[in-house]
Image (cartoon, coloured by chain):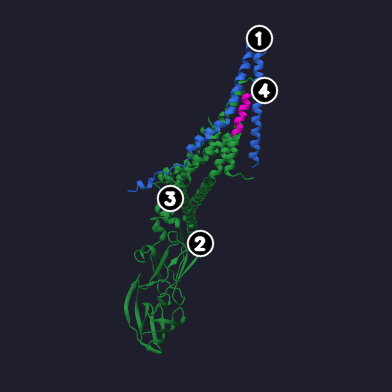
Amino acid sequence: MEIIEFIRQLTLQVMVAAWGIFVLTWIVGWALRGAPIPITRVKKAGNSLIEDAIWAAFWLAMGGTIFSLISYIVSQIGVPVPEPPNIMNQTGT
Amino acid sequence: MILQVPEVLELAFYLGLLNYFLGNLIKALPIPITTVKKIGLGMIKDSLAIWILASSFTLILNTIEYVRGVLGISWTPLWAWFGIQTATIIGYINALKALGSVLGGFLGSVVGPLISSAVSILTTALTSIMALQILSVVVNTRGVEILALGIVLYSVPLRIFRRSGSLLISFIVVFSIALPGLPGFVEFLSTNIASSEASAVYSQGIAYPNIYVRDLTGSPMGYGLLHFYDVDIEAGDGEPIAIYPLSINGSIVMRNISWGLPVGRNLTAVLESVGWLFRYDKTISIPSSCIYSRCDIKIDLPGVMASDSIHLVIHTPRTLTEYYFEKRISESGGEIRLLLNVYGEDNVTITYPESTEIIEVKLNGEAIDIEPVREWSWYGIRGYDASIHIDTPGLNEIVIIYRKGEIGLIDLPAKGYASSLMGGDPIIYFLGTAITTVFLTLVFPTVYLSLLVMGTYSLARFLEGR
């Protein structure tokens, strides 16, 4: 289907962009942190950028694993439920 | 472009993936603002919810089935309930309209507005039943698709359609489980007010056909009581379900709402007249089209060979094979000439009230004397049976010349089918049952539906994560 294909392409592009932005943020973060500016706030901002970028990279890498974990758990629960006991027959007497 | 359910789920999965990567992208943006980071984290969490929903599609469907099975409710009784209620309401509307047309004069002007408002409320009830029916058909046949659509709307990034998606999902979950329980709910609330027996009978319908009773020659048989029996219930014996008096011209025109006959049942008729019971040899089944439009039912009694209404009734002899007749009837008397072909010795019985004077009876051209063999009395009319003996098989000619007298109006009782069902005054019965029906089909379902809507809303809030 066209729309599914479109969403897939979009997702792929977003993923590539996300990796790119991770690299960019990581570099910007280190640049801020290592810059010769003696202001603590700038250093801290750089530090938080690096931290967020690392987390984002971690989740990006874990994406497939998380999804397959969810699929596995749900497929274990999602097996057809056995027939319920027939209440009508039990109250028949 | 029509998406099938698996493709819709696939779409939802990719949308979840898109959500996930978008969230990561936002989180990785080199903007040191906490709000933006939080949006990214929220999207990552959303994508987990979307994946769980999209992959538990069959789990949701199975759970719905399971809960319905545990509660012991299914769609089939709901369809049956809709059918019965629709038929009942239509029956009441028709009956009330018939009642309105029967009543005239002062009573009509008093009851008329009541009837018209009752009809309008019943019409509303009918509309609500139909709307419920459509809703249940949609939930039953399109539930899977709507659920998939809800999941896909739920999955659109940035929570754009999250609210409508979760509403659709919870609508299908709640209504698939609980909507078939509507008859049980209504029954539970209405155990005391529903006259279920009468409405069950009424749902099969009552018709008010015109009935014409004739002898073998096609002449109308007046002055009689026509008994109707249900063949299937009483095997034609026992209590008649209805008794209606015939007018002088041998017809029953049902201008009374408490009369009527059941539709679709096998009936047999017996005419009670001049101290005799004449059985109709066929079964009558009134078609349901008679409820809505005028219809005529003709009953040709095989036991009466020829007649001049009540003044002279000639019974069919047992061994008759064929016959020819001539009738000359005037206001004051008449002459009936019959040419009979019988295959054995036989008797032709004639029945006449005492106001009729038999002037002459001729058998094969010779005048014979006849003596009354039995005296009868029937609703104030007294009369005699006499018999003409035929010795020789084959063709015989009988001529009966008579003079007839005045027979006053006789008061014949009636037992209405509808009034025996209602056990009382039809107007009060109909208005009362109209109110009951409105409660059954309008008020209680509305209460139930609002409960379901509340449930849907709560579940939607839960899914939405608020």
Which mark's residue is nearer the viewer, 1 or 2? 1
Residue to which mark 2 is pinned: B289
- Of residue B256 and residue A65, the one placed in the foreground of this image is A65
Q: What amino acid is found at the position of numbered circle 2 in the picture?
A: Ser
Res B265 seen here: yes
Magenta-drawn segment: B16-30
Separation of marks 2 and 4 at Cα, in angstroms: 82 Å
Residue to which mark 3 is pinned: B432
Mark sitting on residue A24: 4
Give the chain letter at badge 3. B
In the picture, measured across the screen, residue B342 lies left or right of residue B97, that is: left
Q: Colour of chain A?
A: blue
Res B30 seen here: no
Which residue ends up furthest to the top in the rendered image?
A38
Residue A18 in the image: state x and y as whole percent.
Answer: 64, 27
Q: Secondary structure at mark 1?
A: loop
Q: What amino acid is found at the position of numbered circle 3 in the picture?
A: Gly
In the picture, measured across the screen, residue B49 lies left or right of residue B376, that is: right
Residue B59 in the image: state x and y as whole percent.
Answer: 49, 39
- The chain in green: B
Residue to which mark 1 is pinned: A38
